[in-house]
Image (cartoon, rainbow, N blue to C red):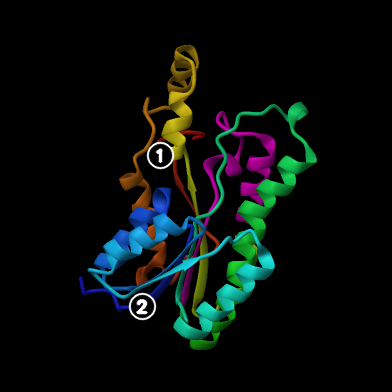
Amino acid sequence: MSAPTPRTALLIGAAGGILKEVSRELAEQGHTLVLFDRDAAAVHLLAEELGRLTKVEAVVGDITDIPAAQAQLTDIVDRFAPSILVNGVGGDTRVIGYADLTRDHFDQTYLENVVSSWIAVKVCAPRMAAEGYGRIVNFASAGGRTYSHFNNAAYVGAKAAVIGMTKQMAYELAGTGVVANVVAHGPIATDRVAGAFERRTEESKKDVMSRLPMGRYGTVAEAVGSVLHLCSESAGYSTGSVIDINGGLYM
C-alpha cells in the first residue's frame, strides 16, 4: 500500500480524548496538523510533542464562541487550507432523567455538539470543494443512534442531530470531492469517561458492565481506527455514513 499523500488536517478539540491519539497517528503519517483546543496548556504540549514528527500549528480557541471561532477558522482556512476536518468536540457523562433536564441543558449540549460542528464545516468545506478534495469527520455517539444508558435526552438528541446534519451536508457536497461522515462511538474509556465510571457506586458499576455485551468499555486505541479511515483517501466513496464502534451495544 502506498503512503498517504501529505495533507493538512484541522482537528477541533485536539488535545483531549480520542482526538489526541488521532492527532498522533496523522502526524506519524506525515500530515500537517492544525490543533484547535480551548485548553492552552494541553494543546501547546501536544503541539510540542508532535512537532518532532511534522509541521504543527496550535490554535487556542473556544469553538462554542461562534463569532470568535468563525474568525479563527477563517484565518486557518486562509493560511493552511485544511483538506481534513475532524470535529471531536462535545460529550456528556451526566445521567439526568428527562423530567430533571432544563432548557439550559439543551441549549448547551446543542451548542457544544451541533452548532460547533456546523460552524467548522461551514467555514472549511467551501475551500475543500473549490479544491476538489476533502474529508470531514463529525463525532456523534451510539446513543444518538437509539438511546443511552450513560447520558441524557438532551445529549442523545444533540448527537442524533449531528447525524442528521452530517447526512444533509454529505448530500449537498456529493460530487465535489468532499465527503462527510460520522463516527458513533459507544462507551470509550477516555480520561473523562473512565473518571465518571469510577465515581459510580459499586452497584452502579456492576449494572453498567452488565449492559455491555463485551463486558468492558472500549479503549481509545480501538476508537481511533474508524476516524483515521474516514480521514483517508480510501474513504472517497463513503459519504453520509455512520460508523458504529460500540462493542455490540444496541445491536
For label 1, count other residues whose C-alpha is less than 10 Å away and answer few (under 14), some (14-19) or many (20+).
few
Image: 42 above or below 57: above
Q: Secondary structure at mark 1?
A: helix
Residue 232: x and y in percent read 36, 68
Image: 90 above or below 1: above
Residue ranking furthest to the left: 1
Q: Which residue is mark 2?
A: 7
For the residues labelled 2 and 1, say whether their Cβ atoms are less than 8 Å apart: no
Who's the residue at 58% across and 60% down the image?
Answer: 62
Between residue 123 and residue 1, name the one nearer to us. Answer: 123
Q: Which residue is mark 1?
A: 191
Give the amino acid at mark 1. Asp
Between residue 7 and residue 177, name the one nearer to us. Answer: 7
* 127 in magenta: no
Who's the residue at 47% across and 76% down the image?
Answer: 134
Q: What distance separates the C-alpha of mark 2 from that of mark 1? A: 29 Å
Image: 120 above or below 113: below
Q: Between tags 2 and 1, which lies in front?
A: 1
Which residues fall within the magenta stretch? 134-163
